[in-house]
């Protein structure tokens, strides 16, 4: 009967046992995957906290770097100014040679500018203080002054760029002393900037070291996060593969159950139909017997009511015959 319903109890039980084992394994895998994800989230939180610290620290570092850049720029300005003034001093010291004509044909902008400035001043003073200058001489002097001023105009951008000191070359010693004082001041400012840069350099080294530490910690936590997520993903992939088998087993059990239920339903319907047909046949038979019995067409041995009626009829007929015999015998005696 079991095989007729497409049911194999042993096979179904084995499949249910296998399904139970797979479902147990799925639950364990899900717990493992969730643990990996929880651990990954903890590493992500630590990474994010470190990254926030790194961001704040980098802002502080950027400000310090900007300050260091400004100090370096100021340091370079003072150095350039000092070097330019020292060049002027060297030019003044070598003025005698320069006045004889630079054999190399080279003159510094500072020396040339100061020399021209002094000559223009002297010529203007002579022009103003001395009278009686001939028109021709006056014209020549004015032309020379004009040419010198034009040349000074050409030299001004370079002189201003180097922040050179304009000195009066009429007194060479005083000019050299003034330039030395300016050079010393520029050098002192340069040294001050240098010391500030050195002090800040130590601070920057510490800031860079802490930045590198934070970056390393952030990278470490991120790598741990990635590793945990990869483990979680690997376990999840196994769950998906196993769930395919679980669903296949569930589908097989469902089909077997539906086939079994269908067979039981069909079987019950068949039995009910047979029982109903048999009951109807029994009623028909009983009705026919009842009809035959009531009509006297059918007799059974025993003490049925029909039997008793037949016996009564026969008995009545027999008694009637006996009575008739008695009458005949009486009559016969009388005639004798």
Image (cartoon, rainbow, N blue to C red):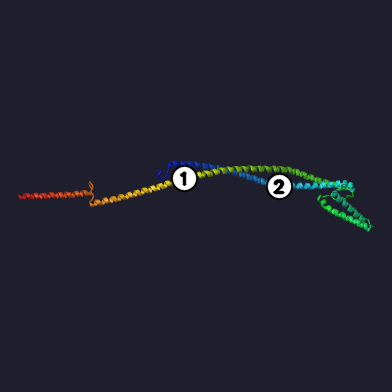
Residue 30 shows in the view: no
Q: Split into 4 quadrants, where in the image is the N terminus?
A: top left
Q: Name the residue: 11% across, 50% down.
A: 324
Would you identify the image quadrant in which residue 46 lies? top right
Q: Earlier in the sequence, mark 2 or mark 1?
A: 2
**Which residue is the site of mark 1?**
252
Kindly state the secondary structure of the residue where label 2 is placed.
helix
Residue 96: percent from left, percent from top: 90, 47
Dot in front, 2 or 1: 1
Q: Nearer the viewer, residue 185 or 266?
A: 266
In the rendered image, the residue lying farthest to the left is 336
In the rendered image, the residue lying farthest to the right is 132
Residue 9 shows in the view: yes
The 10 Å Cα crowd at callout 1, few under 14, some 14 to 19, many 20 or more, is some
Mark number, residue 62: 2
Residue 189: percent from left, percent from top: 80, 46
Kindly state the secondary structure of the residue where label 1 is placed.
helix
Q: Nearer the viewer, residue 265 or 210?
A: 265
Residue 139: percent from left, percent from top: 91, 57
């Amino acid at each position: 009967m079991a095989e007729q319903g497409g049911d194999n109890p042993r096979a179904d039980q084995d499949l249910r046992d296998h399904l139970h084992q797979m479902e147990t394994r799925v639950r364990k895998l899900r717990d493992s995957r969730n643990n990996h994800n929880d651990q990954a989230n903890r590493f992500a939180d630590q990474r994010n906290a470190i990254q926030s610290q790194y961001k704040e620290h980098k802002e502080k570092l950027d400000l310090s770097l900007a300050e260091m850049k400004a100090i370096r720029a100021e340091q370079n300005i003072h150095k350039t100014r000092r070097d330019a003034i020292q060049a002027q001093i060297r030019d003044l010291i070598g003025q005698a040679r320069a006045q004889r004509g630079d054999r190399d044909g080279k003159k510094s902008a500072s020396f040339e500018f100061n020399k021209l400035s002094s000559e223009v001043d002297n010529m203007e003073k002579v022009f103003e203080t001395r009278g009686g200058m001939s028109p021709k001489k006056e014209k020549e002097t004015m032309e020379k002054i004009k040419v010198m001023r034009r040349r000074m105009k050409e030299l001004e951008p370079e002189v201003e760029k180097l922040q050179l000191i304009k000195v009066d070359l009429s007194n060479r010693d005083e000019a050299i002393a003034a330039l030395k004082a300016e050079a010393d001041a520029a050098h002192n400012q340069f040294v001050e900037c240098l010391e500030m840069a050195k002090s800040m350099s130590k601070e920057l080294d510490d800031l860079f070291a802490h930045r590198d530490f934070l970056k390393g910690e952030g990278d470490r936590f991120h790598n741990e996060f990635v590793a945990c997520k990869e483990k979680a993903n690997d376990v999840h992939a196994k769950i998906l593969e196993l769930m395919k088998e679980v669903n296949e087993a569930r589908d097989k059990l469902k089909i077997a159950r539906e086939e079994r239920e269908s067979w039981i339903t069909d079987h019950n319907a068949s039995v009910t139909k047979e029982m109903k047909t048999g009951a109807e046949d029994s009623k028909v038979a009983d009705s026919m017997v009842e009809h035959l019995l009531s009509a006297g067409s059918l007799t059974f041995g025993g003490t049925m009511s029909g039997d008793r009626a037949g016996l009564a009829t026969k008995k009545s007929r027999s008694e009637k015959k006996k009575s008739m015999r008695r009458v005949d015998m009486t009559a016969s005696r009388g005639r004798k």
